[in-house]
Amino acid sequence: MSRTWNFNAGPAVLPEEVLEQVKADLPEIGKSGMSVMELSHRGKAYMAIHQEAAANVRTLMGLPDDYAVLFLQGGASTQFAMVPRNLLTDGQTADYVHTGSWASKAIQEAKLVGRVNLAADTSKERPCRIPKLSELKLTSGAAYVHLTSNETIEGTQWMEFPKSDAPLVADMSSDILSRPIDAGRFALIYAGAQKNIGPAGVTLVIIRKDVAARVSERVPKIFRYATHIEEDSLYNTPPCFAIYVVALVTRWLLKQGSLEAIGARNRAKAQRLYGVIDSGFYRPTAAKECRSQMNVTFRLPSEELEMAFIAEAEAQGMVGLKGHRSVGGARASIYNAMPSEGVEALAVFMQEFARRHG
Ligand code: PMP
C-alpha cells in the first residue's frame, strides 16, 4: 500500500515504524501466546507495557517524583469536567484564559461547577491570538489557572506560560510532547492521545499529587484523580490497546532524541509552511507571534479556490487539509509523526497552486 500524507487534526498520523510494530505484535505480543487486546490488565505482560508508557512520558518530560502519570478514558472533554470537579472547591474562583474553541468548551464545563473568571478573552479577535502575559487579569487566591496550550482549530499556541501562585492547569491535547516545557510549572496537564501520542481512547493526565487531595467526597470515585493515582490507572479496566500504542509512540519519540530535538524538527516543519504562506496568495489566520507549530491555518483568496485547493491536494495524496467548519479555510496539522517529506510535498504543492491561481 502507499500511505497518503495525512494532515488530519486528530485522530492523526502515527509513525509508520509504530504501525509496523503493531502489525508484528498483533497475533502475539512477546511470548504471551495472545494479542495485547486479550491480555489481563493485571497480568505481568500488560503491566510491563503500562509501566513503560508511563516511564517514557516521565523521561521525555523530565517529570519530578511528586507527579503522577495517569491513563484515563473519556477524552480531553471528560477532563473539562473533571478538572473543576476536583480542583474548584466551594466558594473559590477558577481563572480561565479564553483563546478559542477548545478553551470555550473547558469554560462551559467549569461554569457548571463554580465561579469562573475570564483572565483574558481573545476568542473573538481576528487574526486569532493568544494574550500577552501582561494582559492576564488573574484572581488572587484562585483555585487554579486554566489555559489551552494549543488551539487546534484557530491554529494558535502559547509560546511562554504565565507564572502564577495558583496551580497552573493546561489542556495540551494538540501539542503534548511536541516541544520542551518546564513541567514543574504545571500542576495538571491533560491531553487526548489521538494527535501526538497515540490512538483515540486514552487520555494522558499528568498531575502533581498534592492537588488531587482537595477533592470532595461528593465527587464520584471514578471521577477523582486521587482514585486513579492510588490505583496507578488500574481502578477499572484501562484502554489497554491504546496505552500499548502510546508506549510504542513514546519509545519512538525517545529514539528521536530529547523534546528539544523534537521541538526543533517541529519548528522547522512549521516554518517551511509559514514561509510559503508569507510569500503571498495565502493569508494566515493566526497572529505571527503565536502561530501554532502543530496546526497551520490559512485562507485562500476565495472559497472556490479553497475548495479547489483541498480537492487538488487530495488528488495528489494529501488529505485532511480542510479547515474546521467553524473557521473555514485550510489547516495542515503537522504533529510529531508527520515526516518532513510530507510537509515538503505540501509546501511544493502550495507554491505551485499559488503560481497557477495567483
Ligand atoms: N482540547 C483540544 C485542544 C482539542 O484539540 C480537542 C480535540 N480536538 C479536545 C480538547 C477534545 O478532545 P476529545 O475529543 O479527546 O474529548
Image (cartoon, grey):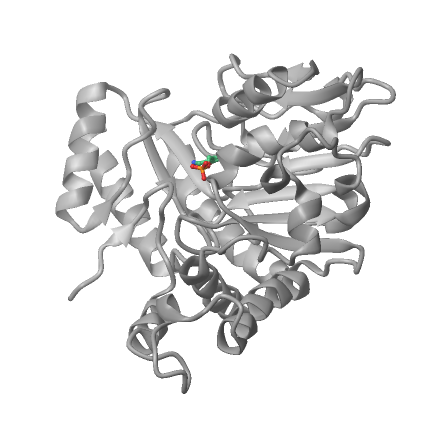
Q: Quadrant of the N terminus?
A: bottom left
| Residue 315 percent coordinates (x, y) | 12, 45
Q: Quadrant of the C terminus?
A: top left
Q: Say which residue appears at 62% left-offset and 15% top-offset.
A: 111
Residue 4 visible in the picture: yes
245 left or right of 183 in image: left
Front-most of residues 102 and 94: 94
**Residue 283 sits in which quadrant?**
top left
Q: Say which residue appears at 51% left-offset and 38% top-offset.
A: 76
Q: Say which residue appears at 55% left-offset and 74% top-offset.
A: 48
**Residue 198 sits in which quadrant?**
bottom left
| Residue 209 percent coordinates (x, y) | 77, 48
308 left or right of 217 in image: left
Q: Does residue 144 sit above or below 249 in this rendering?
A: above
Q: Does residue 40 sit above or below 92 in this rendering?
A: below
**Residue 259 sits in which quadrant?**
bottom right
Front-most of residues 239 and 18: 239
Q: Residue furthest bottom?
A: 31
Residue 289 visible in the picture: no
Front-most of residues 186 and 289: 186
Q: Say which residue appears at 52% left-offset and 42% top-offset.
A: 173
Front-most of residues 208 and 216: 216
Q: Does residue 122 sit above or below 333 in this rendering?
A: above
| Residue 343 percent coordinates (x, y) | 35, 52
| Residue 210 percent coordinates (x, y) | 82, 44
Question: How many numbered marks, from 0 up?
Answer: 0
